[in-house]
Image (cartoon, rainbow, N blue to C red):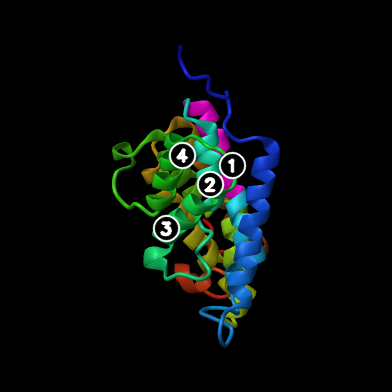
């Protein structure tokens, strides 16, 4: 007689509990910092921003996993834990530390299959992988693609414009900052492999390009430094 396995190893209530744990862990990471911590004055170092990024990645990972035939539970739980250690561990080891935290939580908060725990932790540990995504399990690929895509589009653009203020820049530098989002988006588009992720990247890049053109059209002097056009002239042909 075979062993009966639940269709989904994670109930809605269990997932909500995980979300609460992740947010509380991020908040405690910031509160426990000495002297404000590294880059503490940047908004993306806050628990609120990091948690919002995580939820965005969860949604994207679920969307990609569903369309590509991956295990949605593994993808969404790995996405939820992927940056849990981002605020209290060095960048180089935050993925491994996140996997350790995820394992401890999953092994002590439910009766999840051992294979499920292993796959979630492997995805978290490898989410910073910089090589060819085809070398990875499908669920890990969904997580990495989702993480890349959240830095593209409206969210990435808003963060770059926020950064202008923190770096004492003026709105005249907006084109340069949006161009950084476009470059990041092109890099992400070249890395993602699934058709679903490529479609999302294309849609988001198109919107950023529209915003870039809108800026040029309404602030004609803004781009003169980068195009060589005389001040006061619209640099567009």
Which marked residue is nearer to the observer: mark 4 or mark 3? 3
Q: Name the residue under label 3.
A: 95
Q: Earlier in the sequence, mark 4 or mark 2?
A: 2
Q: How many angstroms separate mark 4 from mark 3 (CA)?
A: 16 Å
Tell me the residue at 42%/39% (across/down): 119
**Image location of residue 76, percent across then percent down:** 55, 41
Q: Please tell me in which quadrant of the rendered image residue 31 appears.
A: bottom right
Q: Name the secondary structure under disc 4.
A: helix
Tell me the residue at 58%/53% (across/down): 54
Q: How many angstroms separate mark 4 from mark 2 (CA)?
A: 20 Å
Q: How many angstroms separate mark 1 from mark 2 (CA)?
A: 7 Å
Q: Mark 4 points at which residue?
A: 142
Q: Please tell me in which quadrant of the rendered image residue 7 appears.
A: top right
Magenta residues, start to end:
56-68
Q: Is residue 206 visible?
A: no
Q: Name the residue under label 2.
A: 106
């Amino acid at each position: 007689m075979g062993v009966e396995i639940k269709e989904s190893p994670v109930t809605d209530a269990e997932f909500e509990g995980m979300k609460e744990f992740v947010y509380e862990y991020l908040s405690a990471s910031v509160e426990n910092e000495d002297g404000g911590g590294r880059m503490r004055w940047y908004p993306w170092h806050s628990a609120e921003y990091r948690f919002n990024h995580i939820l965005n990645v969860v949604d994207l990972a679920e969307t990609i996993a569903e369309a590509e035939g991956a295990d949605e539970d593994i993808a969404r739980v790995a996405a939820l834990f992927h940056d849990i250690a981002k605020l209290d561990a060095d960048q180089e080891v935050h993925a491994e530390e996140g996997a350790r935290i995820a394992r401890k939580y999953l092994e002590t908060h439910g009766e999840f299959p051992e294979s499920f725990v292993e796959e979630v932790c492997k995805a978290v540990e490898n989410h910073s992988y910089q090589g060819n995504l085809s070398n990875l399990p499908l669920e890990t690929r969904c997580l990495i693609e989702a993480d890349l895509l959240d830095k593209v589009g409206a969210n990435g653009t808003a963060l770059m414009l926020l950064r202008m203020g923190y770096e004492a820049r003026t709105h005249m530098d907006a084109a340069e900052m949006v161009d950084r989002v476009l470059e990041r988006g092109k890099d992400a588009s070249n890395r993602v492999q699934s058709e679903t992720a490529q479609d999302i990247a294309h849609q988001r890049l198109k919107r950023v390009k529209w915003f870039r053109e809108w800026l040029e059209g309404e602030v004609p002097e803004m781009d003169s430094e980068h195009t060589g056009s005389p001040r006061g002239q619209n640099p567009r042909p």
